[in-house]
Image (spheres, rainbow, N blue to C red):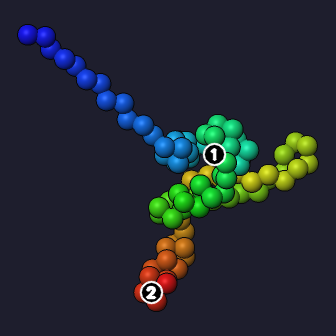
Amino acid sequence: MQKTTTTTKTQTTKAQRLLTALQNGERLTPSQIAKRFSIGNPSAEVSRIRQMGFAVYANKRVAGNNVEVTEYRLGNPSRELIAAGYRALALGL
């Protein structure tokens, strides 16, 4: 009898790959996100990750060519932010 083997390949979405990169401590600009993950609208994808409950912070910095850029990073939410979320839930928002 011949034994058949099947391999399953799990596909990760662009959002999952972006989230994994952020969870690994990477700081990414919208341009880097668009190029690396082929995401057309990086800010919308970051918003979706935030809606999943992850604290993604947008920090502004000035690059070497004096252009202000935004960097996204994953962080720990402050107590005030968590409290505001609970207040919003209590109000039914």
Q: Earlier in the sequence, mark 2 or mark 1?
A: 1
Q: How many marks?
A: 2
Residue 7 falls left or right of residue 85: left
Q: Which residue is mark 2?
A: 92
> Can residue 62 be seen here?
yes
Specify the amino acid type for callout 2: Gly
Measuring from the top left, give residue 63's x and y in whole percent: 84, 46
Q: Nearer the viewer, mark 2 or mark 1?
A: 1
Q: Amino acid at mark 1?
A: Ile
Q: Which residue is mark 1?
A: 39
**Residue 33 visible in image:** no
Instruction: Name the residue rendered at 69%, 38% in the picture.
Output: 35
Q: Which of the numbered marks, if any, corresponds to residue 69? A: none
The percent position of residue 12, horizontal first and vertical second, equals 45, 40
Query: Which quadrant holds the N terminus?
Result: top left
Q: Residue 86, how many percent across, how many down?
A: 45, 80
Along the line of sight, the residue nearer the viewer: 67 or 80: 67
